Image: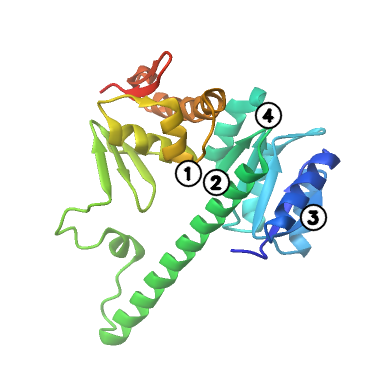
Amino acid sequence: MANEIILIIDDEELLQESISLVLQKAGYRSASVNSGTEGLAFLQENYADLVLLDLKLEDENGLDFIQPIQSLVPGIPILILTANASLDSAIESVRKGARDYIPKPFKPSELIERVEAVLCEVQKEKRRQDIIVNIQELVSELDPGVIPNNEELSKGSGALPRENILTTGFIRVDLDTKAVLIRGERVKLSPTAFQYLVVLMRSWPNPVPVIDLVHEAQGYEVNINEARDLARWRIHEIRKSLASEGIDDSIIQTIRGLGYSLVM
């Protein structure tokens, strides 16, 4: 995947230049603006495949631009750039519609991996919608009186158990659609946090060492301190989402000196 256009919305010019260089080396094209207002103006006249949006802009809150951007360009993925101090805002941005977030400072490889993951996810969704439309058209041609809707096509017949469904206690995840159900209620997680939850569920009731957790969820080979920093963000996000459904966040237990474990 290459040659996609990435719009960078960040008021730090040095960071803009660094990100642009990293993206260029990976085969992407980029454009940079200094504010959310300028970003909206750019998107009114130009095309972009993905937006990198800093939450802390000068005199602006990046959160306030997620919905306007998506209203202007429906379906465009937004990847949030955020400092440690704005973790809660980063999680809130995912709830507002951002695809994921990257804590600053980040490695060039982490940025590219996250960009590629988001763009790949978007392409899969587009292909799935194309398939659904094609099936609807085919069924319509065969029998004009029967046109299945998207929900029916997505659910399938339900006659056989699906191997892509993972259930642990009252938590259920769909490995294909990345849906998370807590006691039947859908909970939104970023793609990366979803992978962390899946690793914990697959390991249950055994704990997962933090280095193994990061490697299995994100594919990173890191030292223990880097692993702790990366995992802490995602575990906090999962706990916060569980708490929104009235579930005690202690079901994800921190095991000092080792890692994390689900306690169901």
Q: Check if mark 4's residue and mark 3's residue have beta carbons within 8 Å.
A: no
Q: Could you tell which of marks 2 and 4 lies nearer the N-terminus?
A: 4
Disc 2 versus disc 1: nearer the observer? 1
How far apart marks 2 and 4 lie (CA) works out to 17 Å
Closer to the N terminus: mark 2 or mark 3? Answer: 3
Residue lying furthest bottom in this view? 141
Residue at 17% of width from left, 53% of height from top?
A: 161
Query: Where residue 200 sits: x, y (%)?
Result: 34, 32
- Helix, strand or loop under label 3: helix
Q: Amino acid at mark 1?
A: Pro
Q: Which mark is residue 99?
A: 2
Give the residue at mark 4.
Answer: 83
Dot 2: element: loop
According to the image, label 3 marks what residue?
A: 41
Q: Local crowd at mark 4 within 10 Å, few (<14), some, or many (≥20)?
A: some
Q: Amino acid at mark 4?
A: Ala
Which of 78/213 is in front? 213
Q: Earlier in the sequence, mark 1 or mark 3?
A: 3
Q: Nearer the viewer, mark 2 or mark 3?
A: 2
Between residues 262 and 187, which one lies in front from this camera angle? 262
Q: How many labels, in total?
A: 4
Residue 77: x, y in percent?
Answer: 59, 52
Residue corresponding to mark 1 = 191
In the picture, measured across the screen, residue 100 lies left or right of residue 86, that is left
Lower sequence index among marks 1 and 4: 4
Upstream in sequence: badge 4 or badge 3: 3
Q: Where, quadrant-wise, is the N terminus in this rendering? A: bottom right
